[in-house]
Image: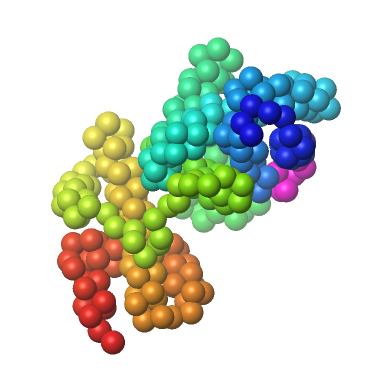
Amino acid sequence: MKGKPSMKAVLWSGASLLLILSLAVPVFNMLTIMLLMVPYVILFTTLSTRSFLLHLVPVWIIAAVILGPSVLIIALFFLIPAMVMGQMYRKRASAPYILRRTTLTILFCLLAELLLFEGVLNQSFIDQIGEFVRALVSDLETEHVLPKEWDSDYTESLIRVMIHSIPQAIILISFVYAVITQYFARKILASSIEDIPTMPKAKDWMLPRIMVFFYLVVYILEIFADTSSSSFYSVALMNLVPLMRYAFTIQAIGFFFYIAHQRKWNKTVPVIIAIPLLIFPPLSLIGVLDAAFPIRKSFSKSS
């Protein structure tokens, strides 16, 4: 069916238009922006590239007429990652590979857009963060919300930490966006296309054991690092430790899904357990232990 326009393609084009228009709705747009790439992926996977563009160009024109051309900045931003994911689905690449490629593509697009805003439009994202925090602190001081000890040094320190955490935030945003898009796109595509690659089940999630060694090295280096420094070394460690902690949190979630599978627990149990794992970072230690030692074998042998 690829390459031939169909009613489904028209409906997905309409869905894309509605999602773009929803960006003008406050609060609601926080949800819909996470789904904006899904119609793109489905259309690119099921249509030829020419038909894909023929379906979406009218969508972009209508959206620009209704909301203004500025909306195209967001609408077109997701085009390249969607095409990458769609191309991988066309080739029936493995799901983990699709996830990695899409995450890296979104990451690249985010960085490119930040550079574009700063280089062409002279809009510095970092400067805007500083201005926003200073204005917020000023308002809070006016309302006498902040403690008396708070001074400009605290404010600048907060700004510095936020700026240093930007790499971590961008990577997490890219990953989460790729996961959400892949989840919904795969579910929808699997209903009409055979042999769509699936992600490994949660119970099978496992990090390489070497990751434990890397994590320990990075963690030890962070202990002796100067947190107030703006050097590449300090900033890299500041971002690496939380990112690796998130990875082991996912490992811990997989561990409990494995136990639930072996013990035949209700499927909601590991989902509920995942909530505190995501909220409390120290619980990622469970994932570290699971990756470092063959803990799962003891559960698979137990009755």
x%, y% of residue 114?
Answer: 51, 24
x%, y% of residue 281?
Answer: 37, 61
* Relative side of 184 to 97, left or right: right
Instruction: Decide whether the magenta segment is chiefly helix, strand or loop.
Output: helix
Q: Is residue 95 above or below residue 109?
A: below
The question of residue 22 being in magenta is answered with yes
* Relative side of 135 to 89, left or right: right
Q: Identify the image quadrant of the N terminus.
A: top right
Residue drawn 83% across the image and 27% down it? 66
Based on the displayed image, in which of its 4 quarters is residue 299 positioned?
bottom left
Based on the displayed image, in which of its 4 quarters is residue 91 positioned?
top left
Q: State the colouring used for the structure image.
A: rainbow
> Is residue 195 visible to the viewer in this orientation of the structure?
yes
Which residue occupies the extreme top position in the image? 120
Q: What is the number of callouts on the image? A: 0
Which residue occupies the extreme bottom position in the image? 303
Q: Nearer the viewer, residue 294 or 222?
A: 294
Q: Is residue 141 above or below residue 40?
A: below
Residue drawn 41% across the image and 80% down it? 264
x%, y% of residue 216?
Answer: 18, 53
Q: Nearer the viewer, residue 261 or 109?
A: 261
Range shown magenta: 21-29
Q: Identify the image quadrant of the C terminus.
A: bottom left
> Is residue 219 visible to the viewer in this orientation of the structure?
no
x%, y% of residue 138?
Answer: 60, 42
Q: Nearer the viewer, residue 260 or 283?
A: 260
* Relative side of 100 to 151, left or right: left
Residue drawn 41% across the image and 35% down it? 101
The question of residue 40 being in magenta is answered with no
Q: Nearer the viewer, residue 256 or 157?
A: 256
Residue drawn 60% across the image and 23% down it? 49
